[in-house]
Amino acid sequence: RAKDALTQTVCFYEVSMDEAARSRRLIANDLWQAVERNELQLHYQVQKAVHTGETVGYEVLLRWHHAVRGTIPPGEFIPIAEECGAILPIGEWVLREACREAATWDNDHKIAVNLSPVQLGNADVADLVHRVLQETGLSPHRLELEITESTIIGDKERALNTLRSIKAFGVTIAIDDFGTGYSSLETLRAFPFDKIKLDRSFMNEVEASPQAKAIVRAILALGQTLRVPVLAEGVETRSQLDILLDEGCDEAQGYFLGRPVPVERIRVGEEKNKAA
Ligand code: C2E
Ligand code: MG
Ligand code: MG
Ligand code: MG
C-alpha cells in the first residue's frame, strides 16, 4: 500500500513536471511570434515627485495578450523569454515603442524601461539604445533604464562598460527593487546609478514595522549622501505617501498614485491636466 501510494505520488509529480516543461515550451514558442502577431502592449505607470505631486515620468510595463491563454503576467513570461532568448527581439520592441511614444508627448516626462540581464549581457545593447534614440528623436535625458542587481551579478566588467557607454549618451540608469538583493551596497558602490528604486516590500511594512521604517530611513540617507534620488515603489495608501513625505523621499510610484494603464489613458490624463 505504502509503496503504491509512493509510486503514485512519484508518477503524479513526474507528470506535473512534464506538464510545466511542456507549457514552458509552448509559451517560448509563441513568444517568438508575439511581436509579429501584435500581442504585446505597453502599460505606463506614473512616477511622481513626493514633495510637489508633479509627474516626473512613467515606467513602461509589458503586457502579453495571448490569443488562447489570455493575458499572461510579465512575471510568468519574462523568465521564459530570457531563457529562450526571445527577450532580445521583445526588449528591442519595448524600447522602440516606448521611445517612439514618448517622443510625441508635449512635455519632458521621462520613460523608464526595464532592461533584462540578458539584454545587458548582449554586446549590442548600447548600440541598440543609440540607434533607437536616433530613429525616434527622443531626447536621451528622457530615457531611463531600470536594471536589477541580478542584472549585473554575471559579468560585472562588461556590464559596467555597457552602462558607461549608455550613460555617455545622456540616458540615466535606475537600480530597480533595491534592498532585496544580497549585494546591494557593493552594487551601489561599483555602479554609476542615477536613481535608487526602493523595493515595494518596504512599503508593505513601513507602517507596521519599525525595522522596515528604519531601513527606509537608512536608504534615504544613503541616497542623500550619494546624491542619488530615491523612488519608493508600491505606494498603495495615503499614509504610506505621508511617511515618505515626512522622511524626505524624492519620488514615488504605486497604485495610490496610478495603476499601470494603456497609453490612451495617460494621454487623456495629460489633456485633462492641460484643460484644468
Ligand atoms: P518592476 O520593474 O519592479 O515593476 C513594478 C511592478 O510592480 C509592476 O508589475 C507593477 O504593476 C507593480 N506595481 C506597481 N505599483 C504597485 C503597487 O502599488 N502595489 C503592488 N502590489 N504592485 C505594484 P508587473 O507589471 O507585473 O511587472 C513585474 C515585473 O516584470 C517588473 O517588475 C519587471 O521586472 C518585469 N517587466 C515588466 N515589463 C518588462 C519589460 O518590458 N522588460 C523586462 N525586461 N522586464 C519587464
Ligand atoms: Mg522596473
Ligand atoms: Mg521595481
Ligand atoms: Mg519589483
Image: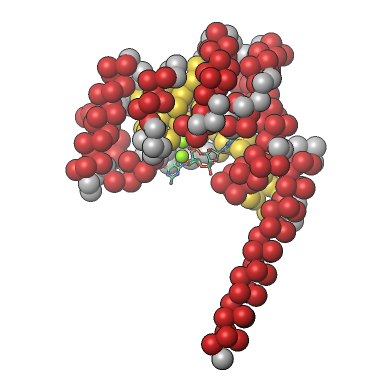
Which residue is drawn at the image coordinates 75% and 37% (left, top)?
A: 35
Q: In the rendering, at what x and y percent does residue 98 appear?
A: 63, 26
- In the rendered image, the residue lying farthest to the bottom is 1
For residue 47, above or below residue 109? below
Which residue is drawn at the image coordinates 67% and 36% (left, top)?
A: 87
For residue 200, above or below residue 221? below
Lateral position of residue 106 relative to residue 217, left or right: right
Lateral position of residue 240 relative to residue 93, left or right: left
For residue 181, above or below residue 166? below
Q: In the rendering, at what x and y percent does residue 34 appear?
A: 75, 42
Any part of residue 32 in sight: yes
Q: In the rendering, at what x and y percent does residue 252 appear?
A: 38, 31
Q: Nearer the viewer, residue 37 or 108?
A: 37
- In the rendered image, the residue lying farthest to the front is 3
> Which quadrant: the N terminus?
bottom right
> Which quadrant: the C terminus?
top left
Lateral position of residue 260 relative to residue 40, left or right: left
Q: Nearer the viewer, residue 164 or 69?
A: 164
User: Toward which corner of the image does residue 82 lie, by quadrant?
Assistant: top right
Colouring: secondary structure
| Total marks in image | 0
User: Toward which corner of the image does residue 178 lie, by quadrant?
Assistant: top left
- In the rendered image, the residue lying farthest to the left is 210
Which residue is drawn at the image coordinates 65% and 75% (left, top)?
A: 11
